[in-house]
Amino acid sequence: MLKKTSSASCEQYISGMISDYLYLVYANCKALYSAPDLDKQTCRNEFKNVIAGICTQLNLSTENELLQKLLKLKTNEAKTFLHVHPFLEIFYLINTLDEINADETDFDALGRFKYTASYQKQHTLESNRVLKLILSTCETIPFLKRSFTPLPVASGFFLSHDIDSLYGSSVQDGLWAIKNFRFDVLLKLFANAITQRPHWFNIDLIMAIESEHDFRSTFYWLVNQGRIDKRQTNADYAILSPKLQTTLKQVQARGFENGLHKSISTQSIQEEAECLQVQVIGNRYHYLKFKLPEAYKAIETSGLKLDASLGFAEQFGFRNAYSFPFSPYNFENGKAFSFLEVPLTIMDGTFQRYMKLPVENTANRIIDFFEEHKQNALISVLWHNTFFTNYKYKGYLQEYKKILAYLHASKLRCLNQTDILKQFSWTQH
Ligand SMILES: [Zn+2]
């Protein structure tokens, strides 16, 4: 049974600092350049004045009351309310209040917020709506025009691999081989089993392919094993086995990074991160299964610096309608969290499992998305290790190679978690 976030439980903690948070959004937006003589306190006061004006217009007396109103706003009634001022829509979208305020029916069988229930889908928002609002307000609101100048930056990309299975090939590719009468493949899989070279244990291959372009990616690892229920399974490998520990060290030695793939378990993120036996700075939730705002609080408590989970399983694009990493608003203390959320933009399974796009069209669809966002974005791409293989997931390796060749030619910057933290971490100003 899913638990709905109780607005009431948030209310008692709110200190109401929407205006300060909005100041941080603008001050940390990479597509803006701050005026050299920007007086930060004056600018913050200007945000306060605008929010105070919005409150008056809405017959509310404090920012606190406005926040409480926003925390009760359902997707279907949000549009009229948010159109009172672009600041409201920016705050609501960037912090995905549509899912924080959602009803139980807005979540799928795994407990994930559905794209169809989102504000952006229901109101057919343009991609990257938040950045568009930020840029347009810098033209139309006098104090913003004085404080910030739009300065487009080339987009960057972040490559990552969730490692759910390393030993699934003999069964899953085996079934594929039987269905397709490929007894030659069965023989190969049998030989792999005997020589202990499982076809899906391909971390070396992934690093070699990406190194050809001098790209470095991040591998997210599960520390718990076994089946949970019919739909959910943790790892089929033991993270503490010598083979896995050697692999994690090889990843680091080649300049790639490791991260935690938070499993389905009652352990905390911190406890799981310690099980990896190597230092990590980032997490992604397994199955993209998380509930907001609790999942953000868990990241903050763990001390990790980055989370890379905020994406829809069934839809590519920007889940919070914003193209840059950001620090979410903490409704308990009215401040920005200290970690960086790096939304997931593109995942292999979205095209294969949910959209059922023919495999040979996958790369072109993704390249089109990159072409539409060549500026002012950090695009995060997840390609599972299983999608680098030849049988059940045949064809996706070639599509990935096409994407990498495009990225190389386009001269977009490849950033790993450390680079992203350096470049996008919010300063509190
Ligand atoms: Zn996973």
Image (tube, rainbow, N blue to C red):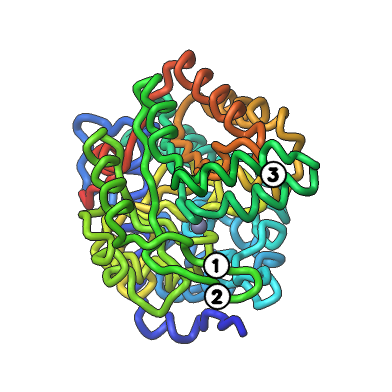
Is the CB–ligand 1 distance for label 1 below 8 Å?
Answer: no
Distance (Cα) linking label 2 and label 3: 23 Å
Q: Earlier in the sequence, mark 2 or mark 3?
A: 2
- Secondary structure state at the residue bearing disc 3: helix
Tag in front: 2 or 3: 2
Q: Amino acid at mark 1?
A: Thr
Q: Amino acid at mark 3?
A: Gln
- The percent coordinates of residue 255 (x first, y second) are 25, 34
- Secondary structure state at the residue bearing disc 2: loop
Q: Earlier in the sequence, mark 1 or mark 3?
A: 1
Q: Looking at the image, can residue 49 be seen?
A: no
What residue is rendered at 36% in x and 67% in y?
Answer: 330
Distance (Cα) linking label 1 and label 3: 19 Å
- The percent coordinates of residue 404 (x first, y second) are 50, 24
Q: Amino acid at mark 2?
A: Ile
Q: Which residue is mark 2?
A: 228
Residue 133 falls left or right of residue 110: left
- How many numbered discs sit on the rendered protein? 3
Q: Local crowd at mark 1 within 10 Å, few (<14), some, or many (≥20)?
A: some
